[in-house]
Image (cartoon, helix red, strand yellow):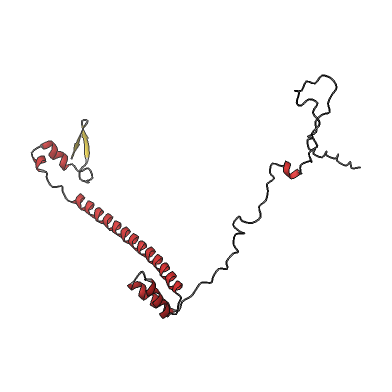
Amino acid sequence: VLAAPPELPLPTVPSTRRAPALPGPCLIPAPACGSPEPPLTPPLPAAALSPFAATRRIGHPYQNRTPPKRKKPRTSFSRVQICELEKRFHRQKYLASAERATLAKALKMTDAQVKTWFQNRRTKWRRQTAEEREAERQQANRLMLHLQQEAFQKSLSQPLPQDPLCMHNSSLYALQNLQPWAEDNKVTSVSGVASVV
């Protein structure tokens, strides 16, 4: 025989009602003693008692300002139009309003289309020139590094020019001719004193 599990008690909401007044001397301060009972407050909903309850917003705060605009499809230009725009751009990066209106009329485009095309083309031109300058700078750095390495290798293979001051002082002359990177110089120790052979 299976026994049913005992029922769990339901959670209770603490009462806001005061205890009834007791006969005898009142030990509570005067204003609270003998005052009429406050009216019962309605019980709070269970969601309000939960610390995780939060009010839910519907939609984005800016959603109700203006109705959303439909995105305009991308305008495609003919090859002839692009060719003429490119030719004009290579001659002139900026157009005055009268020049822009004339070009737009000649290419059967709107003034705004020509203006936008030139703005976009200038942005592309600036990016390309910045990339070219960076490539040139990196190439110049590589060339300088290569030349420095060649000069260093050349200096290792050639003897150092004699310093006139060192010619007359034997200690300085020995130090100037000491080249620890040369293969033919080997340090040997004779009776605790190091000497260069």
In depth, the one of 4 and 155 nearer the eye is 4
Task: Kindly give the residue lying farthest to the right in the view shown.
Answer: 1
Q: Is residue 176 above or below residue 127?
A: above
Q: Is residue 37 above or below residue 158?
A: above
In depth, the one of 120 and 161 nearer the eye is 120
Residue at image location 82% in from the left, 19% down from the top: 25
Give the image quarter of residue 197: top left
In depth, the one of 114 and 50 nearer the eye is 114
The x, y position of residue 143, in whole percent, is 27, 58
Give the image quarter of residue 85: bottom left
Q: Is residue 181 left or right of residue 133?
A: left
Q: Is residue 84 above or below residue 46?
A: below
Residue at image location 36% in from the left, 62% down from the top: 131
Task: Kindly give the residue lying farthest to the top in the view shown.
Answer: 25
Residue at image location 42% in from the left, 77% down from the top: 104
Residue at image location 81% in from the left, 32% down from the top: 37
Give the image quarter of residue 40: top right
Quadrant assignment for the N terminus: top right
Task: Kindly give the residue lying farthest to the left in the view shown.
Answer: 168
Count of numbered marks:
0
In depth, the one of 105 and 89 nearer the eye is 105
The x, y position of residue 43, in whole percent, is 79, 41
The x, y position of residue 78, in whole percent, is 45, 79
The x, y position of residue 44, in whole percent, is 76, 42
